[in-house]
Image: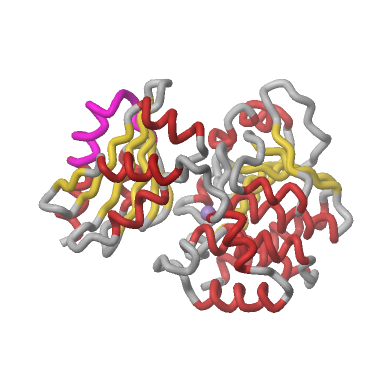
Amino acid sequence: MPGPFHAKLHTSFQDLIASRESFLLTGHENPDGDCLGAETALFHLLRALGKDVAIVNPDPLGHPFDFLAEKAPFSFATADSPLPKFDVAVLLDCSQLSRTGALAPRLRASGATIAVIDHHVGSDHGDGSVCYVDSKAAATGALVRRLYREFGVPLPLAAAEGVFLSLVMDTGWFRYSNTDAEVLSMAAELVGMGVDSSRIYDAIYRRMHPETAAVLAQCLSRHELRLSGKLAMVPIDKTLNERCGHISFDTDLVIDPLRSLLGVEVVAILKERFDGVVKVSMRAKGDVDVQRIAATFGGGGHKKAAGAAIPGGLGTAIPALEERVRQAIAETR
Ligand SMILES: [Mn+2]
């Protein structure tokens, strides 16, 4: 609900765009569909406003989002690859430079203004000196769509596809509780502009590696129900995690069957990595706030979808996470 506070932020973000000439758009490591869709849309908005724009991510466009390569010029940077000249770096779908991996020290040292467009909890307290944030927004792409309206710029088809991608990825194709009136009316409008929803669906979900079914079966077979069936946990050890990485396996596929179980309130996927960290993704059903659980491990996200990195292996991460979830469930009663 945009109140006076947001109106003020909007104005300063608009001023920033109006007063600067060159922009570098970036996002978090392993960018997801919302981040990439929002970048696509913002790229075309800034171009329409006559600005110099480059999209430079910490990682290359990977499967299944490689189809975006024809919608906007995506590039990625390592620690020493050349960067275009920019007055402003815009972080999308995250608010901390540390999320941008090898780009972080370079953006910090550049002296450029750091701007943030994001919908995560607390993103107004990140590294952005100018923020366009709303933690009630379903997707970062929805915020970019709002910016188009504020500038009175019509969306070209590529931008409409970017915003649509953001919406569907962050709402689980309109199934999650963040699917609000704004999402559905924006989606209708975007389809009216020519977005082919089933083509985007096929590009994302109908091009999976042939081993996906076997890996999914393996992941699902490792699930454990804990805390009287309220917590469904999937420990994915280093070897299986490596196999997942090989075929770009989307671990979200594991979440839905488990979240569907009667009694399950939290699903947690724990991915053990060779660098000595366990990456945890949590999804909630009902009222448990997984963003607060993730925050106790230094992570973040949203009330119903959050993540964190826990140092060590599965042997330490599993009991630590189970205890925090137990506390959170007890506090929710
Ligand atoms: Mn997002």
* Spot occupied by residue 320 in the image (x, y as percentages of width and height): 22, 35
Q: Residue at horizontal 51%, vertical 64%? A: 138
* Quadrant of the frame with the C terminus: bottom left
Q: Residue at horizontal 81%, vertical 57%? A: 18
Instruction: Please identify the residue farthest to the left as the structure is shown.
Output: 228
* Residue 38 quadrant: bottom right
User: Position of 241 compared to 246: left or right?
Assistant: left
Instruction: Please identify the residue farthest to the right as the structure is shown.
Output: 50
Q: Is residue 313 magenta?
A: yes
* Residue 277 quadrant: top left
User: Position of 4 compared to 56: left or right?
Assistant: left
Q: Residue at horizontal 83%, vertical 45%? A: 22
Q: How is the image coloured?
A: secondary structure
* Spot occupied by residue 313 in the image (x, y as percentages of width and height): 30, 25
* Spot occupied by residue 97 in the image (x, y as percentages of width and height): 58, 36
* Spot occupied by residue 329 in the image (x, y as percentages of width and height): 18, 54
Instruction: Please identify the residue farthest to the front as the structure is shown.
Output: 210
Q: How many marks?
A: 0
Q: Is residue 118 visible?
A: no
What secondary structure predominates along the stretch shown in magenta?
A: helix
Relative depth, front residue between 270 and 253: 253
Relative depth, front residue between 325 and 63: 63
Q: Is residue 78 magenta?
A: no
Magenta residues (range)? 309-322
